[in-house]
Amino acid sequence: MSSEKFDEEYFADTYHRPEICEKCGAKLEFVGVGAYRCIKCRHEMYDDYGKVRNYLEKHPGANAGEVSDETGVAEKTITHMLREERLQVSKDSKTFLKCEVCGKPIISGKYCKTCGDLAKAADKKKKEQRERKKREMMIQGVGMVTHEDDGKRRFDRDSR
Ligand SMILES: [Zn+2]
Ligand SMILES: [Zn+2]
């Protein structure tokens, strides 16, 4: 991800970005991935994203409820971060997210691999159906054009 600047602004509201230093009240500067540093006393503070990320780095097996309890960040926000794939829990993690189709534990996104593949296959089928319809319409269109051409030719012939 290249535009941290954009992320910083976009998620300022969603992730409760800290405005001023809790120790001395001075301004904070953004130092990356949800972390902010006081320009005066160098005290570091985190927004929701930073808090969750930090916690997960130390407790990779934690589930959303646990993270929420420990960081004070709403479980909904945590789930959202994972769904958007801004966060990933480690592969050996306990149940964190569930596949929306079969309920199997997953580490990011909406579906497990199986259901993701199925969804992709269904998508492909839909696309093929759309293509077929387009082809049918094109054939009809060609038919019409041919008709018109015939008429024109006939007309030309007649007028000659
Ligand atoms: Zn400070
Ligand atoms: Zn699934």
Image: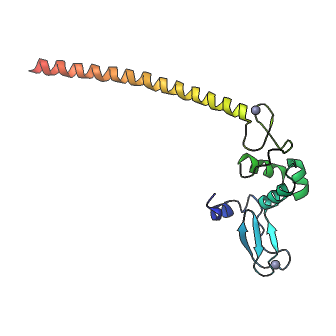
Above or below — where is 97 with respect to 131?
below
Coordinates of residue 97 in the picture (x, y in percent): 80, 42
- Seen as rendered, the residue at the extreme left is 160
Specify the quadrant that holds the C terminus: top left
Which residue is painted at 79% across and 78% down in the image? 42
- Residue sitting farthest toward the front: 92
Q: How is the image coloured?
A: rainbow
x, y percent for residue 88:
76, 49
Question: Which quadrant of the figure has residue 57?
Answer: bottom right
Q: Position of residue 150 (x, y in %)?
A: 23, 19
Residue at 79% in and 59% down: 48
Determine whether, in the image, residue 124 is placed left or right of residue 53.
Answer: left
- Where is residue 138, by image quadrant? top left
Q: Note whether 44 is above or below 52 in the view shown.
A: below
In this rendering, position of residue 73 left or right of residue 159 = right
Q: Is residue 16 left or right of residue 142?
A: right
Q: Residue at x 68, y 63 (%)?
A: 8
On the rendering, which quadrant does ligand 1 occupy? bottom right
- Of residues 13 and 83, the one nearer the viewer is 83
Q: Quadrant of the N terminus?
A: bottom right
**Numbered-mark total:** 0
Q: Residue furthest bottom?
A: 40
Could you say where residue 90 lies in the image, as x and y percent from the top left?
Answer: 80, 48
**Residue at 67%, 29% in the rendered image:** 118
